[in-house]
Amino acid sequence: MEILLRAKCFQRLAVPGSVRAVHKDYRIVTPQNFSNYESIKQDFKLEVPEYFNFAKDVLDKWTNTEKAGKRPSNPAFWWVSGNGKEVRWSFEELGSLSRKFANILAEACALQRGDRVIVILPRIPEWWLANIACLRTGTVVIPGTTQLTQKDILYRLQSSKAKCIITNEVLAPAVDAVASKCENLHSKLIVSQKPREGWGNLKEMMKHASDNHTCVKTKHNEMMAIYFTSGTSGPPKMTGHTHSSFGLGLSVNGRFWLDLTPSDVMWNTSDTGWAKSAWSSVFSPWIQGACVFAHYLPRFEPTSILQILDVNGNVLPPGQEGDIGIQVLPTRPFGLFTHYVDNPTKTASTLRGNFYITGDRGYMDEDGYFWFVARSDDIILSSGYRIGPFEVESALIEHPAVAESAVVSSPDPIRGEVVKAFIVLSPDYKSHDQEQLKKEIQEHVKKTTAPYKYPRKVEFIQELPKTISGKIKRNELRKQEWETI
């Protein structure tokens, strides 16, 4: 979720701990906001230079204008903790600190341009410094959520061949447990008040590091970041992003979608392990010179390129379901990842004609709005009817007995396959008669959505299999059903 805090809210936010009382301005830029929207859309074009580095060409430029007094007085970065601690950095301070961090990567860790660095940190200031330091050194940052397990960390270290990992004292033991199995890993940095054997203590190292660092000259199409997909089908895959895909491509997001200016404060609540955090907590706001706000909470018109497609890659008319695709030929959108790293077969499988196939099914209505139906491999074909599990799950969750549900196909000798619902019951219903409850839930779905979509099979389970990001692994449930044949 993104919260755009306009200047009128800024003074109220200045008091530590008052964040939750702030007015939230959810602003969406639409054609009505621009009197000359059509001309802007037609004339807009991104010029891609041969060399580009976001730290040098964007962040450091804001430092220069800040010195010249051309920017409002609000900070570049503003962070508050749950206990009232606060950090405010100007672009100049952000630059100095990130150059210190860059020198640690280059000198203490001996990292070279193109080396890969895994960063697993919560919403703390060092996460932002690590991202910028990787930009300055030309190393490839690989963010990860703090929800990763020891097994997840091992997989990511081995798959990426990362030479360095940066994390905190919570996850350091998990890293130490698998480090001997990762032959490429030679540097470990910890964000902690306490020293840990075998780790460089970042807080101490920052005190002694020099802020005299020259940013590496990177080509616009060099690898800048790698994100691991959630892996709902098969293990997580590495998606590669270049310096221009985020650093330039997200200028559209910052300027037109979020409508940011140097006077604005941008608060994005996405987890630091997801690409969304880079989009809206780093690149989009800082491209526009806006202030990035972060609150440490441990728990807590693409119509020209986006089109709903048939099996041959043809654009479908409104109301007709198809695969959602993004046009990548003749020009690939900057913000789209470039390829699956070290997996050309998977990369090729996502292309159909001029489109990148997202793996989602949906349709476009008469007003041009896109409606998600389901993941392509989750569609259920029963007696000739195509059924999206999302619709059935939406109906199921409306019943008070259903806490969570997952809908998959199940083999049937007459209909080919039928809808099966795996349901986690709400605590108050666990003692109810299950056969009677099944019938009641089935009747509820018949009344809530089209009758042919109701789950002919229902199974009550204790919990649903999920990915680290919380996505339900329908593929595991589906495999379980079909392997019994």
Image: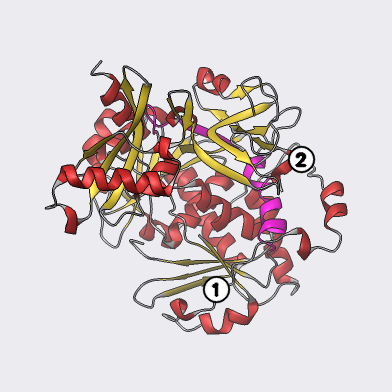
Which circle's residue, 1 or 2, is located before the other in the chain? 1
Residue 369: where, in percent of width, then height? 65, 48
Nearer the observer, 142 or 360: 360
Q: What residue type is labelled 1?
A: Lys
Picture coordinates of residue 73, whole percent (x, y): 65, 77
Q: What element carries label 2?
A: loop
Q: Is mark 1 on a helix, strand or loop?
A: loop
- Magenta segment boundaries in residue numbering: 232-259
In the drawing, does residue 263 fall left or right of residue 232?
Answer: right
Q: Which residue is drawn at 70% across and 34% down?
A: 317
- Point out the image quarter for the C terminus: top left
Residue under the point 42% across and 62% down:
207
**Please, is residue 359 above or below residue 451 in the view?**
above
Q: Mark 2 points at which residue?
A: 48
- Identify residue for label 1: 24
| Coloration of the structure image | secondary structure
Report the residue at 24% width, 41% height from top: 176
